Image: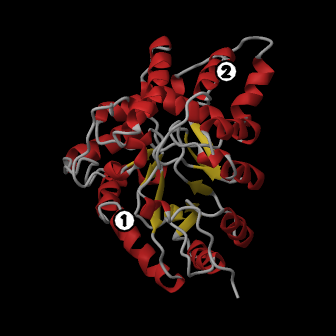
Amino acid sequence: MKRRNLFKAGLAVAGGGLLASVASAQKTGTPVTIVKGKRRLGQQLEVSSIGLGVQNMPRTYQTTIPSRPEMINIIRKAFENGVTLFDTAEVYGPLESERILGEAVAPFRNKIVLETKFFRSRPEQLKEKVEGMLKRLRTDRIDLLYQHRVDREVPIEDIVGAIKNLIDEGKVLHYGLSEPGLQTIRRAHATHPVTAIQNEYSLLWRGPEKAVLPLCEELGIGFVPWSPLGVGFLTGAIDANTRFAQGDIRGGEGRFTPENLPNNLALVALIKKWAEQKSATPAQISLAWLLAQKPWIVPIPGTTQMAHMLENNGADQVRLSVDEWTSFNTDLDKIEIKGLRLPQGVLNMSDVEAPEKK
């Protein structure tokens, strides 16, 4: 679907959080207020309006190994600056991201929300899998556990049933799904309420606006965008001359090929223009836009740089008036992003429907 049509669909169903505010505020010209501090995922899970992803703390996109003490400092500083949602997964590292996060948050574990993900585990394997997570995270419970990708061979009812057993034991408090098919979301939610969906969503990739966000709103499910800064693209860190190091996953994404980058950089130019006007950074404008879409959207930008974490955490201070957001979105509507968002093999694991339970 062209970006223009996707944008219009998003306005109709996913932009209500912003556009309802726009409609009600137009008469007074008052600014759209982005909620600072806390948001709610699902019915009960309260978190900071912006979280922190720690995927790259064991190994960056550029394949370098960050300083472990500095990664711990970043996590702890994020907490000091109001972040209470921290995201990881067993495949990040692998396993090492959970270890870093567990060590970092140990002094304030009971004041935060830890979310992690398991990858395609069979129901009978899940308890053992979670025990390993608990050990690495140095905790007695996982606040929000995601199935990282839907298993094509296992009915979602069986997966959710195994998670429900862990919830009954107090080892998991809430659960979610990442990049699932729509009917799988419905079936999972009917088995036990889903707290959050974690999909890619940003100014660079707005696919969830078509159907996933409306479904989340219908069912009362929170939404946690991964890669909310377009793997660095929306910050202005990538330009037409950028070539990626061997092993950098971005090198396999069609949207960043030499053929597509010049076209797609029109989006960065738009963001930079507004960043300058609002005395903000491109990253802050990009995150502020996400926060403006719905009050139950909580982005989890990742970084290995202290300055970037502090910058990202300040995004909910950015204020655009109703007219300014309208102008921004009008220009946004004119930009069509070219190229696939992920390598095809990875993309094939998204929007998967679990088999029917027999």
- The answer to whether residue 198 is seen in the rendering is yes
Image quarter hosting the C terminus: bottom right
SS for callout 1:
loop
Report the amino acid beneath label 2: Thr
Which residue is the extreme one toward the front?
259
Q: In the drawing, does residue 221 fall left or right of residue 174?
A: right
Q: Where does the image place residue 140, in percent across and percent down from the top left?
A: 44, 67
- The answer to whether residue 80 is seen in the rendering is no
Q: Where does the image place residue 267, in percent across and percent down from the top left?
A: 48, 29
Q: Nearer the viewer, residue 86 or 155?
A: 155
Question: Given contact means CB atoms under 8 Å apart, are the residues at marks 1 and 2 in contact?
Answer: no
- Residue 20 to residue 209: above or below: above
> Which residue corresponds to mark 2?
326
Residue located at (43% from left, 64% from top): 345
Residue located at (52% from left, 64% from top): 145
Report the amino acid beneath label 1: Val
For mark 2, does the 10 Å Cα neighbourhood hold few (<14), some (14 to 19), or many (20 or more) residues?
some
- Residue 227 to residue 330: above or below: below
Q: Nearer the viewer, residue 44 or 33?
A: 33
- Residue 148 to residue 237: above or below: below
Where, by quadrant of the figure, is residue 128 drawn?
A: bottom left
> Which residue corresponds to mark 1?
91
Label of residue 153 in the image: none
The first of marks 1 and 2 along the sequence is 1
Q: Where does the image place residue 284, in percent across and percent down from the top left?
A: 46, 27
Where, by quadrant of the figure, is residue 230 drawn?
A: top left
SS for callout 2:
helix
Q: Where does the image place residue 282, in percent across and percent down from the top left?
A: 43, 25
Q: Nearer the viewer, residue 240 or 97?
A: 240
Judged by depth in the image, the label closer to the viewer, 1 or 2, is 2
Residue located at (40% from left, 69% from top): 134
For mark 1, does the 10 Å Cα neighbourhood hold few (<14), some (14 to 19), or many (20 or more) residues?
some
